[in-house]
């Protein structure tokens, strides 16, 4: 997987030798909320805060509330003209989800680069990612993109 061309809001990746597919980010609109919910409910076991599948009403309330949050930024990841995933920045925390059928093509890594460009334009100086220790593909994308490990997080259920 090769990065072929880098621009501020679009990256082309090379697959199968010569076949070029473009990755772009576009701002989330309300009609994307169901897609985002689908991803959240598919992948919640990777997240710390979300413990179970959430109903549409709760998700919509959350999304509605975040409209007022000037530190919340979110985009749909477009790959080969299709909605392939989602990236959001909440304060400094960046989170990415890529739908199963699009995984392992370098999409998250390139989407992270694009989100960093957008974050820089927004005046964000640092991004962090909270990753479960067994989330190997997620660790890989951040390590590949020069994020450094800063903390360990220990916890124990005591009740
Ligand atoms: C994490 C996630 C976003 C990665 O998306 P993706 O588009 O597949 O990521 P990329 O293709 O850019 O990179 C994945 C890398 O992990 C590697 N990888 C995949 N599975 C792996 C595993 N089990 N162990 C180690 N590495 C693995 C891939 O080979 C690839 O590395 P490479 O580019 O050097 O070949 C996607 O798996 C996902 O949505 N997971 C569920 C949600 C989540 O955990 N999000 C992260 C929270 S921020």
Image (cartoon, rainbow, N blue to C red):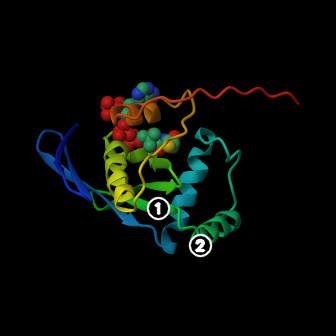
The residue positioned 17% from the left and 39% from the top of the image is: 16
Position of residue 99 in the picture relative to residue 157 (left or right): left
> Who comes first in sequence, dot 2 or dot 1?
2
Whereabouts is ligand 1, in terms of quadrant?
top left
The residue sitting at 68% across, 51% down in the picture is: 53
Badge 1: few (under 14), some or many (20 or more) residues near its Cα, within 10 Å? some
Q: Quadrant of residue 33?
A: bottom right
Per the model, the C-alpha gap separating discs 2 and 1 is: 13 Å
Tell how many labels.
2
Task: Say if disc 1 is inside 8 Å of ligand 1.
Answer: no
Q: Of tags 2 and 1, which is closer to the observer?
A: 2
Q: Percent from the top left, x then y, of residue 17? A: 13, 39
> Against 117, is 59 above or below?
below
- x, y (%) of residue 89? 49, 55
Left or right of 133 on screen, residue 137: left
Residue 100, how many percent across, how many down?
A: 44, 44
Residue placed farthest to the left in the image? 18
Residue 139's tag is none
Q: Is residue 78 left or right of residue 38?
A: left
Residue 136 higher or lower than 91, as above or below: above
Kindly give the residue lying farthest to the right in the view shown.
159
Residue 22 x/y as whole percent: 23, 55
Image quadrant where one finds the C terminus: top right
User: Residue 23 occupies which quadrant of the picture?
Assistant: bottom left
Q: Looking at the figure, which quarter contains the N terminus?
A: top left
Judging from the image, what secondary structure is the residue with disc 1 in?
strand
Which type of secondary structure does the marked residue at label 2 adopt?
loop
Q: Residue 44, relative to residue 32: is it above or below? A: above
Q: Answer whether residue 12 is visible to the viewer in this image.
A: yes
Q: Which residue is mark 2?
A: 68
Is residue 103 visible from the viewing direction of this image?
no
Where does label 1 land, which residue? 74
């Amino acid at each position: 997987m090769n990065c072929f061309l880098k621009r501020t809001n679009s990256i082309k990746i090379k697959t199968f030798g010569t076949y070029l597919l473009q990755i772009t980010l576009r701002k989330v609109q309300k009609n994307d909320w169901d897609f985002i919910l689908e991803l959240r409910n598919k992948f919640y076991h990777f997240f710390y805060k979300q413990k179970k599948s959430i109903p549409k009403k709760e998700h919509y309330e959350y999304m509605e509330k975040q409209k007022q949050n000037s530190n919340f930024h979110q985009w749909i990841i477009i790959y080969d003209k299709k909605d392939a995933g989602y990236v959001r920045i909440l304060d400094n925390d960046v989170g990415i989800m890529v739908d199963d059928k699009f995984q392992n093509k370098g999409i998250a890594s390139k989407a992270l680069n694009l989100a960093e460009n957008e974050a820089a334009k927004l005046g964000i100086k640092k991004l962090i990612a909270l990753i479960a220790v067994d989330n190997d593909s997620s660790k890989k994308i951040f390590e590949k993109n020069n994020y450094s490990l800063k903390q360990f997080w220990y916890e124990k259920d005591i009740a």
